[in-house]
Amino acid sequence: MDSELERAGSRRVYGDPDGRWCEVFLDTYRLPAGRTLELHRVRVGAGRTGVVVLARRDGLTLMVRQWRPAVGRWMWELPRGFGESGPAADALRELAEETGLRGGAAEVLALVDVDSGLLESEVAVVEVTVPADAVLGGGGSGDGEVASARWWSREELADGIRRGEVRDGFTLAALGVAAAYG
């Protein structure tokens, strides 16, 4: 088995003042042959475990539509957010913030590294059961982050992936985890 590479140095090249939202580091690694390699690493949410929410109700999965400036387009994706207190509580908070829904049981299914080449922080895939009588908060969030939300069947999710409507890495990783659980 390969051994870990030694980090010979690290320099913070960007970050918000308190490092709460985003920091970028330039790390130098010493390779086995003696050469060095420089790689960027991004830490978000102060390095706390983020969450992606698999909100489920009656065999359906909740998706939200948001504008993503980094890719310049609207994206259908699972609700997600930064970690603050712990994955289960964070998932319930994000679900409420983005959709107005109050979830019931929340279970961490897995931890994923959605971009192991760049993002330092892991993300918890949390399945949240939503009561059948829960009503979406007007189809979007109170803060305007989410433009709309709707429940998707398994077939609609598969079709959305094939058509390229669902292509967010967090969402695809979480749906892969969900498929492993059946």
Image: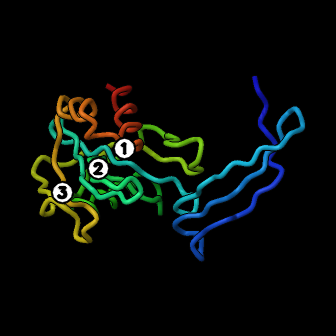
- Horizontal arrangement in the rendering, residue 172 relative to residue 35 (left or right): left
Q: Which quadrant of the figure contains the N terminus? A: top right
Residue 8 in picture, x, y percent from top left: 83, 50
Tag 1 secondary structure: loop
Which comes sooner in the sequence, label 3 or label 2? 2
The residue lying furthest to the bottom in this view is 17
Residue occupying image coordinates x 25% and y 40%: 165
Q: Nearer the viewer, residue 160 or 50?
A: 160
The colour scheme used here is rainbow
Give the CA distance from mark 3 to mark 2: 11 Å
Looking at numbered disc 1 in the image, what kind of residue is underneath it? Asp
Residue 73 in picture, x, y percent from top left: 30, 53
Mark 3: few/some/many CA within 10 Å (<14, 14-19, 20+): some
Q: Residue 148 got which mark?
A: 3
Q: Residue 75 got which mark?
A: 2
Q: Residue 168 got which mark?
A: 1
Residue 64 in picture, x, y percent from top left: 24, 52
The residue lying furthest to the front in this view is 72
Contact flag, marks 1 and 3 (Cβ < 8 Å): no
Looking at numbered disc 2 in the image, what kind of residue is underneath it? Met
Which comes sooner in the sequence, label 1 or label 3? 3
Contact flag, marks 2 and 1 (Cβ < 8 Å): yes
Residue occupying image coordinates x 18% and y 53%: 149
Give the CA distance from mark 2 to mark 1: 7 Å
